[in-house]
């Protein structure tokens, strides 16, 4: 337990918070990278997912593709991209975007699937345009599962962003790898505890967000989270 | 390709290391999840508590977990046992929910009927509930298998040998072919294990898909009909 | 002989399925519980093999109080046949039939041999033995269910709406088959149905139940038809609607029986069957 005490001493030592390699900077880096990745992945996956969900085509390709990505080891992806684009943030960002897309995609199109087709037929029957159906019916009703997908992706990204430091991309993983090189287990432990705390905070944040954004009438009776289903995995690599 | 040809023994060695970590973790998570899943399924009050705490376990990032485990279990940081424990925990996080869902998927009429003809609770669990939960259990363990095989590579960054070592070694020595080999082999291992699981499932559940020709034709007709309606 | 003595069953949610129920079910006869849903008929049946335990009162089989018997052992010596056959989908037909003997410790080989004989008894071809239930028709599944119920050679056979889910033609076949079986095997059969025609066809003793397990009338079909005790029974058996009030009408080509609204319902023949009531 001595290690644990030393690790917390490391975290709570103000000297370790400032400076370019301090906890403050690395925390911001970690969050910034994670946010950037989720935004990019969402910008790609949500429109594609809505298209698949709305038209009902291309679903099998999306399912197989997502399954394939889940089998893909992220560490391999990060290192191979880093070798071609160089050390830094680019490689982990690309790898993390690839990792995040399946969850968001699944959330987006399964949100559509969860909607009773009769509701949509009814909307069409009263004369709504396709665009109006998407924005007024499918989007609000599909929101719970989309939020679940975003939550799952964010968790994966925050976890896996730890690997960014392995290819010189910064973030909280830095403490892990510095500690590993210098045989400083308390420092590794400190970095680990910080990442774990961040991941749990993200979970809590999304749990609250889901409650706030999803109207009660919609929440009742719908499966609220993609990641809650046993059939979906996240092949988190860090 | 040259790299592969020159390093076949290394690739085999790493594949062996990989399997020695992933396979025990998959088996252990399956075995351990069954009693926990049963409790979550059987006692209504426990379901929320068990599934939420297990879900929280899943939210813990894996690399940091592998660093924390030695502190709790007392294994060495670079010991494969450390990785097996961590991967088993992840497997359990996925599999407990699957197990609870699987047991919930068993037709309650069949359960009632088994009790009515005189299966004791214990016999009913082993001979009726568990086999009939098989398809959902299989789906769950397949997800665990793929995710475990992929996660095993992460151990390489803390020095635990696996196919992931091909990533770290290839990265440090700037050998792209080595990393690609690692990626391909990891996916291959995942696919082979998946195939094995499917075959085990087929061998253990011969009643799945045993449908009379007449019924199959009727199902096909029904499928066509519903297709026409939605088209 | 099965005896219910002031049996009450109250479920945890507060519903009283059966209240202060008394009845003697004679051995080697068919007793049919008939009533609509909520009449407690299935609960009564399930109390016999302790799938449900009474809240108060007692049930005895041949003088032995069932509450003193171990439920699992009790169930293994009572046959049980339920709606949708209740077969185990992952057991082959032969394994389903042999389930109870194997649970009772009969060697597998012998249990399977005996199960094959039972397939003959219920009129199924032995070639079906290696199929799974999903590969059989509804009527065939129901026959397998009966065979399974008979496998341990029980004195008592409980049947919970066993023919409720099959189409009318198959149901009629199964009913005739059951009458034949009962004549050959001489079991104490307790049968639950909501179909009064089925009850009159199969029952030696018919128990008409009102909501809450209240006995409206007990008697042989002819007794009940001849003298319904109250309006509820009369209504239930269709006497009021005139379906059973038949009269003879002469037509040009002979005499026929008509119901009270004048629809042809049958013809009058000389009694030939020895077991006619």
Image: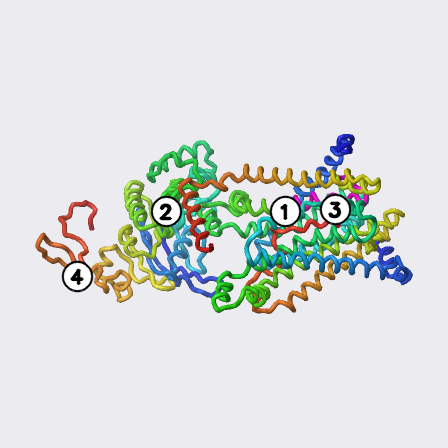
Q: Nearer the viewer, residue B216 or B124?
A: B216
Check residue B161 for magenta coloring: yes
**Could you say which disc has been placed on residue B143 in the image?**
1
In the image, the segment drawn in magenta is B145-162
Real-space Cα separation, disc 4 to disc 1, in angstroms: 68 Å
Callouts 4 and 3 on one subunit: no
Distance between the Cα atoms at labels 3 and 2?
A: 66 Å
**Which of the colour schemes (rainbow, by chain, secondary structure, one colour) is used?**
rainbow
Residue A7 image offset from top left, x and y in percent: 85, 55
Q: Which residue is mark 4?
A: C262
Q: Nearer the viewer, mark 4 or mark 1?
A: 1
Look at mark 2 in the image and give the residue it sits on. C157
Give how far across and how far down residue C228 sits, in percent.
Answer: 24, 62
For label 3, the residue is A77
Which secondary structure, mark 1? helix
Front tag of 4 and 2: 4
Q: Chain of mark 3?
A: A
**Dot 4, how many residues are within 10 Å of its Cα: few (below 14), some (14-19), or many (20+)?**
few
CB of mark 1 within 8 Å of CB of mark 3? no
């Amino acid at each position: 337990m001595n290690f644990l005490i030393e690790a917390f001493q490391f975290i709570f030592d103000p000297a370790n918070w400032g400076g370019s390699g301090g906890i403050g900077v690395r925390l911001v880096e970690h969050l910034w990278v994670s946010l950037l990745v989720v935004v990019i992945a969402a910008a790609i996956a949500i429109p594609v997912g809505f298209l698949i969900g709305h038209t009902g085509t291309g679903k099998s390709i999306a399912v197989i593709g997502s399954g394939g990505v889940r089998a893909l080891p992220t560490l391999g992806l990060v290192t191979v991209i880093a070798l071609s684009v160089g050390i830094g943030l680019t490689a982990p960002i690309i790898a993390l975007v690839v990792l995040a897309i399946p969850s968001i995609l699944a959330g987006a199109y399964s949100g559509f699937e969860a909607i009773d087709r009769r509701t949509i037929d009814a909307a069409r029957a009263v004369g709504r345009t396709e665009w109006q159906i998407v924005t007024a019916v499918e989007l609000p009703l599909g929101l719970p599962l989309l939020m679940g997908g975003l939550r799952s992706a964010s968790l994966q990204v925050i976890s896996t962003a730890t690997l960014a430091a392995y290819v010189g991309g910064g973030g909280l993983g830095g403490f892990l790898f510095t500690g590993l090189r210098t045989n400083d287990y308390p420092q590794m432990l400190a970095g680990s505890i910080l990442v774990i705390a961040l991941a749990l905070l993200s979970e809590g944040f999304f749990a609250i967000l889901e409650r706030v954004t999803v109207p009660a009438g919609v929440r009742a009776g719908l499966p609220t989270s993609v990641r809650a289903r046993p059939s979906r995995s996240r092949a988190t690599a860090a | 390709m040259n790299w592969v040809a020159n390093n076949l023994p290394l690739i085999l060695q790493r594949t062996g290391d990989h399997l020695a970590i992933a396979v025990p973790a998959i088996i252990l998570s399956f075995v351990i999840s069954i009693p926990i899943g049963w409790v979550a399924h059987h006692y209504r009050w426990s379901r929320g508590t068990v599934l939420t705490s297990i879900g929280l376990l899943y939210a813990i990032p894996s690399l940091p977990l592998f660093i924390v485990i030695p502190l709790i279990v007392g294994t060495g940081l670079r010991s494969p046992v450390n990785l097996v424990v961590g991967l088993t925990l992840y497997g359990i996080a996925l599999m407990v929910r699957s197990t609870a869902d699987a047991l919930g998927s068993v037709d309650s009429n069949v359960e009632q009927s088994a009790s009515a003809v005189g299966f004791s609770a214990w016999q009913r669990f082993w001979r009726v509930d568990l086999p009939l939960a098989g398809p959902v259990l299989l789906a769950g363990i397949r997800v665990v298998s793929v995710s475990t095989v992929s996660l095993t590579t992460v151990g390489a960054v803390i020095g635990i040998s696996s196919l992931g070592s091909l990533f770290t070694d290839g990265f440090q020595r700037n050998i792209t072919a080595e990393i690609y080999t690692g990626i391909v082999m990891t996916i291959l291992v995942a696919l082979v294990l998946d195939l094995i699981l499917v075959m085990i499932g087929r061998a253990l559940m011969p009643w799945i898909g045993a449908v009379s020709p007449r019924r199959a034709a009727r199902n096909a007709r029904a499928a066509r009909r519903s297709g026409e309606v939605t088209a | 002989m099965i005896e219910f003595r002031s049996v009450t069953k109250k479920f945890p949610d507060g519903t009283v399925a059966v209240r202060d129920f008394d009845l003697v079910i004679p051995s080697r006869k068919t007793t049919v519980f008939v009533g609509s849903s909520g009449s407690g008929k299935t609960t009564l049946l399930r109390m016999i093999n302790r799938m449900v335990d009474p809240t108060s009162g007692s049930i005895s089989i041949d003088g032995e109080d069932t509450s003193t018997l171990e439920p699992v052992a009790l169930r293994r010596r009572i046959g049980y046949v339920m709606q949708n056959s209740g077969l185990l989908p992952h057991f082959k037909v032969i394994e389903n039939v042999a389930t109870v003997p194997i649970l009772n410790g009969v060697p597998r080989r012998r249990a399977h041999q005996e199960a094959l004989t039972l397939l003959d008894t219920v009129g199924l071809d032995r070639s079906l033995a290696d199929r799974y239930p999903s590969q059989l028709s509804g009527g065939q599944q129901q026959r397998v269910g009966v065979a399974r119920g008979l496998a341990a050679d029980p004195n008592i056979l409980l049947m919970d709406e066993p023919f409720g889910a099959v189409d009318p033609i198959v149901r009629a076949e199964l009913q005739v088959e059951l009458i034949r079986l009962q004549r050959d095997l001489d079991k104490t059969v307790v049968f639950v149905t909501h179909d009064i025609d089925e009850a009159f066809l199969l029952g030696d003793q018919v128990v008409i139940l009102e909501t809450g397990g209240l006995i409206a009338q007990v008697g042989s079909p002819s007794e009940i038809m001849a003298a319904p005790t109250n309006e509820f029974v009369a209504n239930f058996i269709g006497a009021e609607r005139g379906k059973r009030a038949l009269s003879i009408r002469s037509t040009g080509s002979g005499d026929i029986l008509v119901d009270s609204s004048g629809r042809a319902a049958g013809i009058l023949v000389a009694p030939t069957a020895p077991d006619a009531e």
